[in-house]
Amino acid sequence: MEKNIIELIDIVKTFPGVVANDHVNFSLKAGEIHALLGENGAGKTTLMNILYGIYRMDSGKIKVDGREVQIRSPRDAIKLGIGMVHQNFKLIPAHTVTENVILGSEGSRLILDVEGAAKEIRSLALNFGLYVDPLAEVWKLSMGERQRVEILKLLYRNVRVMILDEPTTVLTPQEKKELFISLKEMCSRGKSIIFITHKLDEVFEISDRVTVLRRGKNVATKVTRETSKVELANLMIGRPVVFEYVKNPLKPSGIALKVENIRVLDEDGNLKLKDVSFNLRFGEIVGVAGVAGNGQRELAEAITGLRKVYSGKIYVCGKDLTNLSPKKFFENGVLFIPEERLGVGTAPNLSLAENLILKTYDRKPFSNSILLNYKEIQKFSEKLVKDFEILCPSVRVPVKFLSGGNLQKVVLARELGSPVGGDGHVIVAMYPTRGLDVGATEYVRKLLLKMRDEGNAIILFSEDLDEILSLSDRIFVMFEGKIVGEMLSHEADIEKIGLMMAGVMGS
Ligand SMILES: Nc1ncnc2c1ncn2[C@@H]1O[C@H](COP(=O)(O)OP(=O)(O)OP(=O)(O)O)[C@@H](O)[C@H]1O
Ligand SMILES: [Mg+2]
């Protein structure tokens, strides 16, 4: 049996109103990939931030190679050979890959030798399959490439323990495959990896062992091949989870959204949508499959009024809304779950309750047009917190203190749980379960199906083909700004969708 290189013993960390880590134990063996699994707010990021010297623990011990150590900053952690890649990357966009990699490490190397560094980075990249041009400027890179830079930065500092916080969230399926190959390569070269996730499939694809946290407590550590998806889901959320969804028969009514030959340009004037046309009916879910970056975002923004169309028409319930404001779209019943939940999605310094009524505060019952009715707002927020299982000390906390996944639930709750006028809505859902744990994913999927059955029209963008197949009535495949395929979901063929996504064939 390999020996432990890292031991976290009895770690306690509290924030006002929450015990984020409640006597947690965790160990990492040399050469293993250890998944840290837990639902949103379980305390995964907090625990790793303690190991990486970002947070100070209230009590507990950290041992590296059997010796107790004090880790007061990421610098201390790096010296001990421990590195972390955060959920939100911390690169400087205007600098090159090489500059980003060596930034902050030159002190230990005395001379700033950019050319030498570029060479070293190139060879690290080659060894670990982390392809990226050392001379490229970071702002030009895709999210997958930026992540490689973050990893290279740690390899360049010669860490032997790599902590990755939900690394696949920003990746395309292809990039994810490549990342996993690199991670395995790292392990075979003696590195150890802590892999934070709440995706059960990934646990089985990549890890040797898995530790489950629930509400700040350890619930179990298992050898991955000796456990199952069902067991882990149960441990993670404390109840059995549904993996299959029951879909009622389709009862579509009138046309909710009609898109006619729209063309959309990006900031640089490139054509991102090329004559896209389709209808969406009340009572149906249309799933849009495709590798991110093939026009999905532009399409979603166009049909919610966030992006102007260059030509073509958009009708909601027969009304021409082409190039009107997002507010007009909203008032006509178009609801949007944006891809970017931080920033566009939420106001970080406002409270949870305020974020929940961000779009509806000027309506009854929250306001009588002069005064806000705090009692109603509180009641409403507390109901949403309960329905969406948002983990928070109270509805008065600023949302910037919520965990990543809980923040997403806030956006979902606001968009799907708000009382807006009209009967049927058009719901534009961009990756609605991305970053959510199994419990919350199940809730959101069931909610979308319920909203469909209640007569709403839903267009669902997702990179998860299983999600698209299990929820949609019809499926579109997007490739390079066009809808290259359309099929009924019960006739859909995964292989064929995959080929269309790669641009190999159209229907
Ligand atoms: N800086 C902070 N201030 C106050 N509370 C915090 C802070 N950081 C985390 N918390 C709280 O601690 C708990 C654990 O959060 P943490 O970010 O560790 O969860 P997580 O398991 O990483 O979740 P996710 O999957 O959503 O990223 C949450 O209730 C969160 O609101
Ligand atoms: Mg987290």
Image (tube, rainbow, N blue to C red):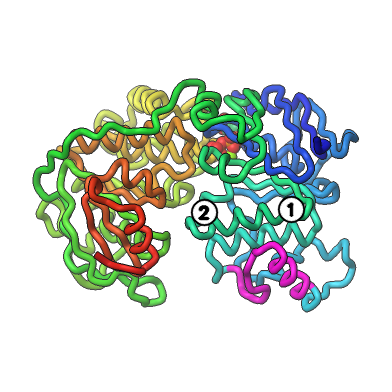
- Residue 152: image location, x then y, percent: 70, 61
Magenta range is 117-138
* Quadrant of the rendering where the C terminus is positioned: bottom left
Q: Which residue is mark 1?
A: 188
Which amino acid type is shown beneath numbered disc 2?
Val
The answer to whether 72 is drawn above or below residue 280 in the figure is above
The answer to whether 214 is drawn above or below residue 199 in the figure is above
- Residue 410: image location, x then y, percent: 42, 37
Mark 1–mark 2 Cα distance, whole angstroms, equals 25 Å
The one nearer the camera, 30 or 457, is 30
The answer to whether 288 is drawn above or below residue 244 in the figure is below
Q: Is residue 321 visible?
A: no
Please check the rendered image and state whether residue 123 is part of the magenta-colored stretch, yes or no.
yes
> In this image, 338 relative to 180: left or right?
left
> In this image, 304 relative to 439: left or right?
left
| Of callouts 1 and 2, the N-terminal one | 2
Q: How many marks?
A: 2
Q: Which callout, 1 or 2, points to the residue nearer the camera?
A: 1
Q: Residues within 10 Å of mark 1 (few under 14, many from 20)?
A: few
